[in-house]
Image (cartoon, rainbow, N blue to C red):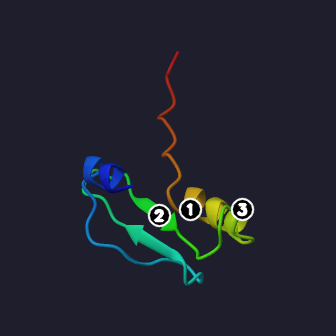
Protein backbone atom coordinates (compact mmCIF):
# COMPACT_ATOMS: atom_id res chain seq x y z
CA UNK A 1 0.00 0.00 0.00
CA UNK A 2 2.94 2.31 0.62
CA UNK A 3 4.00 1.93 -3.03
CA UNK A 4 0.49 2.71 -4.26
CA UNK A 5 0.28 5.84 -2.12
CA UNK A 6 3.69 6.93 -3.38
CA UNK A 7 2.73 6.24 -7.01
CA UNK A 8 -0.48 8.28 -6.56
CA UNK A 9 1.39 11.13 -4.82
CA UNK A 10 -0.77 10.85 -1.71
CA UNK A 11 -0.65 13.13 1.29
CA UNK A 12 -0.88 12.02 4.91
CA UNK A 13 -4.02 10.09 5.71
CA UNK A 14 -7.08 11.26 7.61
CA UNK A 15 -10.17 9.40 8.89
CA UNK A 16 -12.70 8.57 6.18
CA UNK A 17 -16.38 7.85 6.57
CA UNK A 18 -18.09 6.54 9.66
CA UNK A 19 -15.85 3.49 10.03
CA UNK A 20 -13.06 3.79 12.57
CA UNK A 21 -10.98 1.48 10.37
CA UNK A 22 -10.88 3.64 7.21
CA UNK A 23 -8.26 6.18 6.19
CA UNK A 24 -8.26 8.37 3.08
CA UNK A 25 -5.06 9.56 1.45
CA UNK A 26 -5.74 12.48 -0.88
CA UNK A 27 -3.74 12.55 -4.08
CA UNK A 28 -2.00 15.33 -6.00
CA UNK A 29 -2.59 13.31 -9.18
CA UNK A 30 -6.34 12.94 -8.57
CA UNK A 31 -6.10 9.27 -7.59
CA UNK A 32 -6.96 9.06 -3.88
CA UNK A 33 -6.45 5.89 -1.88
CA UNK A 34 -8.76 4.66 0.89
CA UNK A 35 -7.72 1.84 3.17
CA UNK A 36 -9.94 0.03 5.66
CA UNK A 37 -7.74 -2.05 7.92
CA UNK A 38 -9.44 -3.86 10.78
CA UNK A 39 -8.11 -6.09 13.56
CA UNK A 40 -9.84 -9.23 12.25
CA UNK A 41 -7.99 -11.96 10.43
CA UNK A 42 -8.84 -12.61 6.80
CA UNK A 43 -12.47 -11.71 7.27
CA UNK A 44 -14.39 -9.29 5.09
CA UNK A 45 -15.41 -6.10 6.91
CA UNK A 46 -19.21 -6.28 7.09
CA UNK A 47 -19.62 -2.67 5.95
CA UNK A 48 -17.10 -3.05 3.08
CA UNK A 49 -19.68 -3.20 0.24
CA UNK A 50 -21.30 0.03 1.45
CA UNK A 51 -17.89 1.72 1.77
CA UNK A 52 -16.82 0.59 -1.71
CA UNK A 53 -19.98 2.07 -3.24
CA UNK A 54 -19.43 5.30 -1.29
CA UNK A 55 -15.86 5.57 -2.57
CA UNK A 56 -16.84 5.12 -6.22
CA UNK A 57 -19.74 7.57 -5.91
CA UNK A 58 -17.41 10.19 -4.44
CA UNK A 59 -14.77 9.57 -7.10
CA UNK A 60 -16.87 8.92 -10.18
CA UNK A 61 -15.15 9.24 -13.52
CA UNK A 62 -16.34 12.39 -15.28
CA UNK A 63 -18.51 11.77 -18.31
CA UNK A 64 -16.75 12.19 -21.62
CA UNK A 65 -18.01 15.08 -23.76
CA UNK A 66 -20.47 14.07 -26.45
CA UNK A 67 -18.90 13.55 -29.85
CA UNK A 68 -20.59 15.45 -32.64
CA UNK A 69 -21.24 13.38 -35.78
| C-beta proximity under 8 Å, tags 1 and 3 | no
Identify the secondary structure beneath mark 3.
Answer: helix
Judge by depth and name the residue closer to the eye, 53 or 5. Answer: 5
Q: Where does residue 33 sit, x and y in percent of width and height?
A: 42, 59
Q: Residue at x 47, y 34 (%)?
A: 65
Do the residues under discs 1 and 2 have CB atoms within 8 angstroms? yes
Between marks 3 and 2, how big is the CA–CA gap?
13 Å
Q: Nearer the viewer, mark 1 or mark 2?
A: 2
Question: Could you classify mark 2 by the number of other residues whose Cα lies within 10 Å: few (under 14), some (14-19), or many (20 or more)?
Answer: some
Q: Tell me if residue 55 comes above or below residue 21 in the rendering.
A: above
Q: Which residue is mark 1?
A: 55
Q: Is residue 8 left or right of residue 40?
A: left
**Quadrant position of residue 10:** bottom left
The earlier-in-sequence mark between 3 and 2 is 2
| Position of residue 3 measured from the top left corner of the image (x, y, whole percent) | 31, 49
Instruction: Tell me the number on the disc at residue 49.
Output: 3
Q: Can you say which quadrant of the picture contains the N terminus?
A: bottom left
Decide which of 28, 38 is in the foreground and name it.
38
Q: Secondary structure at mark 2?
A: strand
Spatial separation of the CA atoms under disc 1 and disc 2: 8 Å
Tally the numbered discs.
Answer: 3
Circle 2 sits on which residue? 34
In front of the other: 28 or 19: 19
Q: Earlier in the sequence, mark 1 or mark 3?
A: 3
Query: What percent of the width, then of the height, locates residue 17?
Result: 55, 79
Residue 53, how many percent across, how many down?
66, 60
Residue 27 horizontal side relative to residue 15, left or right? left
Q: Earlier in the sequence, mark 1 or mark 2?
A: 2
Tell me the residue at 27%/72% (across/down).
12
Residue at the front extreme? 41
Which of these two is toward me, 6 or 56? 6
SS assignment at label 1 = helix
Amino acid sequence: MDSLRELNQCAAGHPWGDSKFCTEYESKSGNPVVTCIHPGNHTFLKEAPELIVKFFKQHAKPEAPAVKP
